[in-house]
Amino acid sequence: MPSVLDQRPAPAAAHRAEAPRRRTRLLALPEARWALAASVLFLLALSAYLLGGPAWLWGTLFAATYVTGGWEPGWQGLKALKDKTLDVDLLMIVAALGAAAIEQVLDGALLIVIFATSGALEAVATARTADSVRGLLDLAPTTATRLPADGVEESVDTARLRIGDTILVRPGERIGADGRVREGTSDVDQATITGEPLPVAKQAGDEVFAGTVNGTGALRVCVGRDPSDSVIARIVKMVEEASETKAPTQLFIEKIEQRYSIGMVLATLAVFAVPLALGDPLRSALLRAMTFMIVASPCAVVLSTMPPLLSAIANAGRRGVLVKSAVVMERLGRIDIVALDKTGTLPEGTPRVTDIRPLPGTGLDTAELLALAAAAEHPSEHPLARAVVGAAREQSIRLSGAEDFSSVPGEGVTATVDGHLVQVGSPSRMLVDTAAHGPHKMLVAELEDAGRTAVAVLRDGDVVGVLGIADRPRPDAAATVLALTELTGRTPVLLTGDNERAARHLADEVGITDVRAGLLPQDKARAVKVWEAEGRRVLVVGDGVNDAPALAAAHCGIAMGKAGSDLALETADAVVVRDELTTIPSIVRLSRTARRLVIQNLVVAGAFITVLAAWDLIGTLPLPLGVAGHEGSTVIVGLNGLRLLREAAWPRIPKDTE
């Protein structure tokens, strides 16, 4: 692979094309190779058998078919038996050997081939799920240019980077690690991580992510996370862990599988012993018993659940929605009420300072008031804090350092700036002890009446000014609200710590009628718990910071667009990395589709088992037909689950309600 130093500037689209989603080649899977070998040997054996070839030839080929197609599941079954677990795979091998014992060699070989093929399909489903995530690792470069203390550049593997290292990112290169810009300005294409369609301006102090593409300026980046803990690495780890979890339906199936398997063995012995005791020939009784063991095996039932859920997780991951587990994927389809946060969710996420109102007599002008507020807000990651800091940067205001910084979610921040205690935050929380009709109260009311979010600025306990901040709704906000209303039968609820007027102004624009404003994080969590106590299944959508308690309390929680936020990745059940609001109703619909496929699979599997078992008990079911029916149902449910891997399986939500 060429070094990062060898790369040349290229358009962002070209960079995105450099890392196509990798797919595991079919023959790279051992299950597929064994299934192919068994199929080829079976066809050769069948040809020799039908053409009247010597018995030693077709007998050897059939034996090789048994070995290639059956050794792995047989070995796994024996190991499970050692742990006192009866594996249905072992029962299939026993049935095939039983068929061979009564000279039904061809039928047993057919069972082995179809059984191996169904196992290969299951392996393909798992591999395709992993492929959709593994491709993310291609985004991060393998090397980076590190700048040691002596200033001499060196090219090192990105895995060797450590927190605090400084790396040089030249124009057109991919950034080698998560961190913050130390020097330089440039535009960075973050589409692969955040989904932002346009490059984002970066300068000293701004956060950047591994795998994103630098524009035309050179950047010196201070590494802020170990490469193994980068956003991309955590995303990959999270989705891989999701693929290893089991949904409640799957756990229930596995719980009854052992009892069912034991019951099936006892029933098979009865199917063999009873006719034999009544005078049936040994060969006939054994053939009926082997056929019953095959058709009654719950292979298709076991395979009914996970392929649809894993395929849905993979499909969602390709579109920037990271679902943490199969449990979550199954639960998302059950939600019947949605609670949306305001800041960081429904608006575009880039609020701007629209009003700077210093109070008379404070000695501060607009620039000084903004500088004071921005200095205190600079360490904060809240969207409103970024708006204040961004406004100061736009005016080229130099910020003083902030000491003793603290933040209270839902209230605001406190810091020491130039020897003064500065507080910036919600007027309803910070101004409770001030005069009821002071000029600051009038400013707050004026801004809130205009649909602004008012932010109070206090210096040494005295109000020195008020800032007005506004944000536009996302272009897809109204369409998302409409789609969620159609899915749940109820308009989403807006839960926000913002003031009532600003919240209702936004709600009216997007079509929400139920607004609950002025809430602290614990108030949001309390509202969710009340709904849950009423038997509702609540989906909370927030920004993953001050919404963490509500996200944790809900039936399901989705964090919006906080690619770098630890709380978003840890607290929420799913994360919308690319910040597209319409993916929320899409993932709910996909979950419901997956649940429908699970039910379809269980019905198909149950019907096949019932019909074939009844046929064998009441009449005479030919062994080849029983094999084809049983393994055919396994293949059918496997392929049905894989349908959700298709591009067309992702539900499209129109972004325009008109």
Image (cartoon, rainbow, N blue to C red):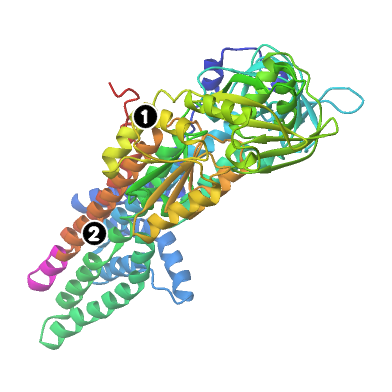
Asked whether residue 204 is drawn in magenta, I would say no
Numbered circle sitting on residue 106 = 2
> Looking at the image, is mark 2 or mark 1 earlier in the sequence?
2
Near-viewer residue (444 or 270): 444
Whether residue 515 sits left or right of residue 198 in the image: it is left
Quadrant of res 65: bottom left
Magenta residue span: 611-622
Please state the horizontal and vertical placement of residue 557, each as a whole percent of the image: 46, 47
The residue sitting at 20% across, 76% down in the picture is 286
Q: How crowded is mark 2: few (under 14 residues within 10 Å), some or many (20 or more)?
A: many
Relative to 639, residue 81 above or below: below
Relative to 116, residue 373 above or below: above
Quadrant of res 157: top right
Q: Distance between the residues labelled 2 and 1?
A: 71 Å
Near-viewer residue (595 or 6): 595
Whether residue 285 sits left or right of residue 523 in the image: it is left
Please state the horizontal and vertical placement of residue 139, each as a whole percent of the image: 59, 29
Near-viewer residue (17 or 479): 479
The residue sitting at 47% across, 50% down in the picture is 243
**Which residue type carries mark 2?**
Leu
Q: The residue tagged with tag 2: helix, strand or loop?
A: helix
Give the main secondary structure, helix, strand or loop, of the magenta stretch.
helix
Quadrant of res 94: bottom left
**Which residue type carries mark 1?**
Asp
Q: In the rendered image, is residue 651 in sight?
A: no
